[in-house]
Image (cartoon, rainbow, N blue to C red):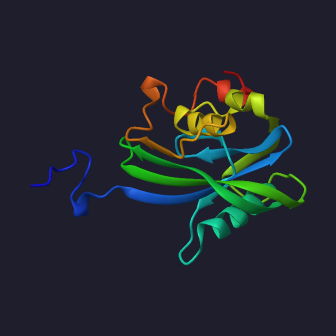
Amino acid sequence: MREECPYRREESALAEQFILGLGLVEDEDRLVIVRNRWAVGEVWSLPGGRLEVGESLTDCVVREVQEETGLLVAPVELAYVQDTHNLVHDQHFLVHVFSCRLVAGTLRVPEHDEYVVDVRWVKRDEVARYITWPTYRDPLLAYLAGHERRYWLDRDGYRPELGKGPDRKGKEEKGWQ
């Protein structure tokens, strides 16, 4: 007899699910990050977004990176996958991060995007000063350090009272840690 997974829900009680494609765009010792205005606060992350119906993950990454940064990229490889659950808001995020080669473009903040409020190049060794949410920071830092782990599961990725979420005290806003 098969044991039931304690995290599995009845079909009628499934969390809202998001399939996302993000681009890890590097240029020598720098990478591109974006500051997003999300429901939980403003958060620095890699550029990317939700997969559209009929779209491949790599097409999603190309489209989203270009929309959010003005840069045209070519996905090279799947860097890692984040499987993150937000139990507070009953959401499930399956995030596919692709290492990308820069093809063309100039970095810019999109004019008509209510969610992206800033974009910038940051040095690899400064990434943790901006991306402070452990759910997003730790897999990225591990990948940049050359670790081989490619799948990251966080069954409870949003708990602000435990430091798992955006820093609402302004530290992320100023790039501090």
Q: Is residue 92 left or right of residue 71?
A: left
Query: In the figure, 156 relative to 90: above or below?
Result: above
Q: Residue 151, image x and y in percent?
A: 49, 46
Residue at horizontal 53%, vertical 53%? 95
User: Is any part of residue 65 visible from this angle?
Assistant: yes
In the picture, measured across the screen, residue 131 lies left or right of residue 103, that is left
At x 40% / y 45%, what residue is drawn? 85
In the rendered image of this protein, does residue 135 appear above or below residue 129?
below
How many marks can you see? 0
Image position of 5 (left or right of 162) = left
Q: Judge whether 52 appears above or below 134 on screen.
A: below
The residue that appears at 64% across and 34% down in the rendered structure is 141
Residue extending farthest left: 1
Can you say which quadrant of the picture contains the C terminus? top right
Query: Which residue is at the front of the view, 71 or 82?
Result: 82
Q: Where on the picture, by quarter, is residue 134?
A: top right
Residue 32: x %, y % from top left:
78, 45
Residue 175 x %, y %: 73, 27
Q: Is residue 70 visible from the viewing direction of this image?
A: no
Q: Position of residue 89 (x, y in %)?
A: 39, 46
> As rendered, which of 5 and 68 lies closer to the eye?
5
Quadrant in which residue 172 is drawn: top right
Q: State the quadrant of the N terminus.
A: bottom left
Q: Is residue 155 left or right of residue 1?
A: right
Using the image, determine if residue 45 lies above or below residue 76. above
Q: What residue do we see at 59% from left, 72% from top?
A: 56
